[in-house]
Amino acid sequence: MSSFRKAILTLALLATAGVAVAQSGKYPGIGRAATDKEVKAWDIDVRPDFKGLPPGSGSVAKGQDVWEAKCAHCHGVFGESNEVFSPLVGGTTAEDVKTGRVANLSRTDYPGRTTLMKVSTVSTLWDYINRAMPWTNPKTLTTEEVYAVTAFLLNLGNIVPDNYVLSDKNIAEVQARMPNRNGMTTKHAMWPGNEFGGTAKPDTANTICMKDCAPEPKLASLLPDFARNAHGNLAEQNRIVGPQRGADTTRPEGKTGAPVSVAPAAAPVAAAAPAGNDNKAVIALLNKHSCTACHGVDKKIVGPGFNEIAKKHAGKVDYLAEKIKKGGVGVWGPIPMPAQSLPEADAKSIAEWISKGASK
Amino acid sequence: MEQHKPSGRVQKAPENFLDQAGIRTVFAEGKKGRRDFIRNAFAAAAAGAAAPVALAQGNPVPSEGGDPNILNLPEHSTGLGQGVAVDGYGKPSKYEANLQRRQSPGLTQTTQASVSFAPLQSLFGIVTPSGLHFERHHQGWWDIDPSKHRLMINGLVKTPKVFTMDEIMRLPSVSRFHFIECGANTAVDWGNVAVPTVQYTHGMLSCSEFTGVPLITLLEMAGADLKKGKFILAEGADGSSMTRTIPMSLITSGEVLVAFGQNGEMLRPENGYPLRLVVPGVQGVSWVKYLRRIEVGDMPYAAKDEAIHYIDLMPDGTHRQYTNIQECKSVVTTPSGGQVLLDKGFYNITGLAWSGKGKIKRVDVSVDGGRNWRTARLETPVLSKALTRFNIDWVWDGKPAIIQSRAQDDTGFVQPTYQQLRKVRGTRSIYHNNAIQSWLVQENGEVKNVQLS
């Protein structure tokens, strides 16, 4: 018997005996065991029963420091800001902490829904801050900082007192004070399994009717005239050939009673001239260094748009380069821009680009 | 741009019904842009004619005896075209430049936590071109080196495992068409009409052929405890490290894929290159992009997008949590809001229907705001948890019309009206708006997004 055939036979015998060959029976050679170190590096989730929560603690006071340095420029000093993201804090009461139901959620006249009004599980806050915050540098907070920021947020919502130190030992007590802890339901038919014992019956039950079904239709809602061009010219958002054209929303609507004929097919207005390579390269830098998280090229976000800066500081390359590196406050309002750590050359390129008009 | 040539699709009065002076006036008026004059002139002439006159021809014979586009051979018929591989990765015609995914102004403050909508009004069939696939990012998108990407399986398993892309792509794969719809698609119209076109009302919807390995294969390789492990957590590798809970029952059915392919090529970076989860019938947020880890567990995880966002507020102030299925829904894509019909006469009403619970069984279409309905043709393929294209003939008489579509899936469920939805869910639930959409065709040919009382 050749040694090759022998090897085959041996493998076959091993398989029948049910012994794992290499790593896994059916797909040998694919995948390997993860090491403890690898699992520890990635397994960061924290469940509602606090499985996965690392031991540690953080105070409200420490949280305030971290907040002002790393969080306030997007979320506001008190977590109330609506500038970039929905407000985190507000709308909850001491009564809600007692009942576990946020009363304002049933009011249709209440203007918004903050994170603390909605969230039912404190683990969710800890887990999310730990995995995804700060927005431009996620996963860079220490365990103590995550505890501290979570404590500070809870304090802003009057869920824990000013001198509180949140820890893995007392977080379950905080869970028992979460204002909306009793505000969730899984009694619906939109979960694709029966794990929650909800219901399989959909909450609407339309039927098929083919003739004389609804009463004479009455218009209840349509876009007001002033919003006609709010989404840009719709003529440029439809194909230039076919059964329809897009409406030219830069002009008032055509007369009723006469279909507006449409101009013959013509090439769409050429998109803005392709950006010069220089502009493209700088815009890539803006993305790379997360500048665009706070500054739009042609619109204000948290900070001024680059076009606004270009207007105000045309030609001032050195001034701009220094501002980028050191940050500042007051030129454009009360929200501070933190100092930025990016290579000198990149700061210079960006400054030059702004000083020349910040074009796309 | 050429100015109003007397040919092409522009409707023009047949000269037989006008005298020479009339024709000159018509052309003069046409040049000034008063195109409706032509129609009025035609209507007057038609009224005077003894024989019944058909609708104006979309493409009438010009006075020179033939269409110059036919009579004068164009350059592309008389010259040499371009060579192969001028562009190593071909692009659409320059005349198609209007088809773009677009942001809805004012919806978000940043572009990294935002959404762009697919141009449904101009798409055919059921497949969304990968470059027009809608986008939803929570913390920006990345183009990740696939040779460095890893997938880990841990939790309630015999052996936690690590896979490289090479290894995942060596395993037996399947290719399946599925729709993906953001749970917040059509959210802005819950209370009233807020946006003009189907791109902005329904454009967080796309459909692709996905290629990947059933997740159950990988879980079995790790020796997952499929009894105790009732749930999995899927986690992304990007900054947001998106996490979502998915029931094991959906995974053991073999439907959930760890996908790397999309429409014959690799996933696009904006759609999760090199690896994403495909969870058929479930809202897009569960289709975790840049997938790095699957944890098997015995309880749900209440991740940020399960306990703060993607929860549906009910009128009594409770939130429905873990609302994942995209229920049966449909929409007419042409004619649709923001479009202008060229003229009276024949049109093909076309649209899309889909259900997160199975196949589309039937679509009915109304052109009178829901009083009377006709059953549309379903085009093949009709696949489970995929978009289905429907078509129906329509002759527009020039009078106002309200076009609606109503889909039914193979569970028997019928797409609800706004009234029915609001009765149980109010107007503040943001997610899972699958109401019947109404488009008003006005006498001037312009189509508007409307809601009926």
Image (cartoon, rainbow, N blue to C red):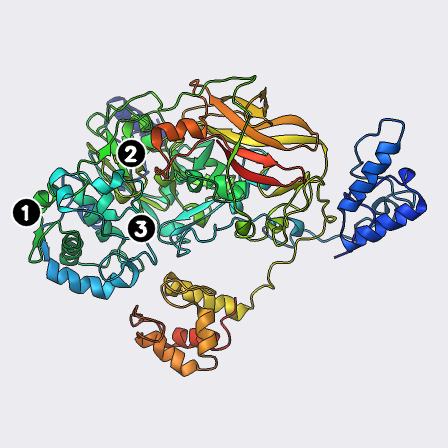
- Whether residue A324 appears in this view of the structure is yes
Front residue (pair A344, A235): A235
Q: Secondary structure at mark 3?
A: loop
Q: Residue at x 72, y 34 (%)?
A: B344
Name the amino acid, label 2: Tyr
Q: Is residue B157 above or below residue B370?
A: below
Quarter of the image where one finds residue A9: top left
Q: Secondary structure at mark 2?
A: loop
In this rendering, would A220 be left or right of B306?
right
Tell me the distance, in whole angstroms, between the alpha carbons under discs 3 and 1.
Answer: 27 Å
Name the amino acid, label 3: Ser
**For the residues tagged 3 and 1, is the chain the same?**
no
Q: Which residue is mark 3?
A: B240
Tell me the distance, in whole angstroms, between the alpha carbons under discs 2 and 1.
Answer: 28 Å
First in sequence, mark 2 or 3: give its number: 3
Name the amino acid, label 1: Lys
Residue A193 x %, y %: 30, 25
